[in-house]
Image (cartoon, helix red, strand yellow):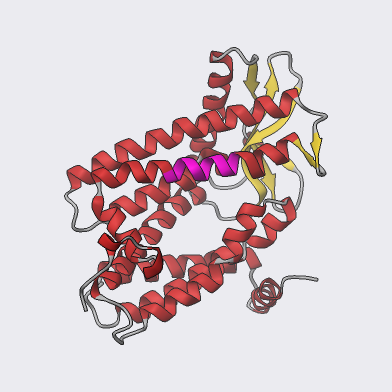
């Protein structure tokens, strides 16, 4: 059975003469623009209505990715993307709520959340849509993993040339691709721009690096969360960025190197129908990454207590500590 929201969107796209992916990107752009506008004009009376529309558009934009994660069998991202649409609708209701159900502190935290999401998603999609930037991140990710593996003595590897996964099937070297390098104007396949990995002997490792391997999503979440702290001086925000971004890159390099080594050395390993790549990539590495981000956030709370306060204000009252309960009416 096909996912009904995606089917409906595809039908709308066909009726207006475009592709479903192009329409999904338009929905995402509108959502980002609405949230960024409402964040920058948070004192305006109409900011809540604009933000509400932004949450719904972005929720739909992320939700439509769930079909892809179902196809590749990534349970963590299935849950996260599938919950985006109901979560967006819930936030839209809160944004348009003008009664005393929300305290002023909670409203300010929701405004921070607008900025966090907008300034997380906008830079990521700028990188995605500009092939030069996209490929630069892919190359940095691939070569960092290669250097790490060789540095710790876990093998000798080499990286292949940059390839392009075509939307209609197949793949071609970047040198043979006829698309624009300044702006991505045509849809690509699931792999996008990728770099395959080989042993130094020329034997293929059967692992390629794509943009989502870069840890950029995790980095940009912290960038958005820190940049959106409008009341915090820039010197403290900059220190927070210096702590979080390089740390995530280093941890992500260890993650990628570990996945390569495990997959390459345990090719016949099976557990409940999962091979080593699926297990290490979709389960073990995801759990370790989420735990590492949790620890990093705790470390940042000492430098940026405003970040902690905003997060606590967005939790249900039952989950807040006594010191975090708002007394503002």
Number of numbered discs present?
0
Q: Along the line of sight, which residue is nearer the eye, 77 or 321?
A: 321
Percent from the top left, x then y, of residue 136? 49, 35
Whether residue 177 is visible to the viewer of this picture, yes or no, is no
Q: Which residues are magenta?
A: 285-294
Percent from the top left, x then y, of residue 271? 79, 39
Quadrant of the snapshot with the C terminus: bottom left
Percent from the top left, x then y, of residue 246? 38, 33
In the image, residue 139 above or below residue 306: above
Q: Along the line of sight, which residue is nearer the eye, 84 or 30?
A: 84
> Within the magenta stretch, is there residue 290?
yes
- Horizontal side, residue 293 vs residue 212: left or right: left
Percent from the top left, x then y, of residue 98? 31, 86
- Horizontal side, residue 229 vs residue 278: left or right: left
Image point (35%, 48%), residue name: 223
> Within the magenta stretch, is there residue 237?
no
In the rendered image, the residue lying farthest to the front is: 322
């Amino acid at each position: 059975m096909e996912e009904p929201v995606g089917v409906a969107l595809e039908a709308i796209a066909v009726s207006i003469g475009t592709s479903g992916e192009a329409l999904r990107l338009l929905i995402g752009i509108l959502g980002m623009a609405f949230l960024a506008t409402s964040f920058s004009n948070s004192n305006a009376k109409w900011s809540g209505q604009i933000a509400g529309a932004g949450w719904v558009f972005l929720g739909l934009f992320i939700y439509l990715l769930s079909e892809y994660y179902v196809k590749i069998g990534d349970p963590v991202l299935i849950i996260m993307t599938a919950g985006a649409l109901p979560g967006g609708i819930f936030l839209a209701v809160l944004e348009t709520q003008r009664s005393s159900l929300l305290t002023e502190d909670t409203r300010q935290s929701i405004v921070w959340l607008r900025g966090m999401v907008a300034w997380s998603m906008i830079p990521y999609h700028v990188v995605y849509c500009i092939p030069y930037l996209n490929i630069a991140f892919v190359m940095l990710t691939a070569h960092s993993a290669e250097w790490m593996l060789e540095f710790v003595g876990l093998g000798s590897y080499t990286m292949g040339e940059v390839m392009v996964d075509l939307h209609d099937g197949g793949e071609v070297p970047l040198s043979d691709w006829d698309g624009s390098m300044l702006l991505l104007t045509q849809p690509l396949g699931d792999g996008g721009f990728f770099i395959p990995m080989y042993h130094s002997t020329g034997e293929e490792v059967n692992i390629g690096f794509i943009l989502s391997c870069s840890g950029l999503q995790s980095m940009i979440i912290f960038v958005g969360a820190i940049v959106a702290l409008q009341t915090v001086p820039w010197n403290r925000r900059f220190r927070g960025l210096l702590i979080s971004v390089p740390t995530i890159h280093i941890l992500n390099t260890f993650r990628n190197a570990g996945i390569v080594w495990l997959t390459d050395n345990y090719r016949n390993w099976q557990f409940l129908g999962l091979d080593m790549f699926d297990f290490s990539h979709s389960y073990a590495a995801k759990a370790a990454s989420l735990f590492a981000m949790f620890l990093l956030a705790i470390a940042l709370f000492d430098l940026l207590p405003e970040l902690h306060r905003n997060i606590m204000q967005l939790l249900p009252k039952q989950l807040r500590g006594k010191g975090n309960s708002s007394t503002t009416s």
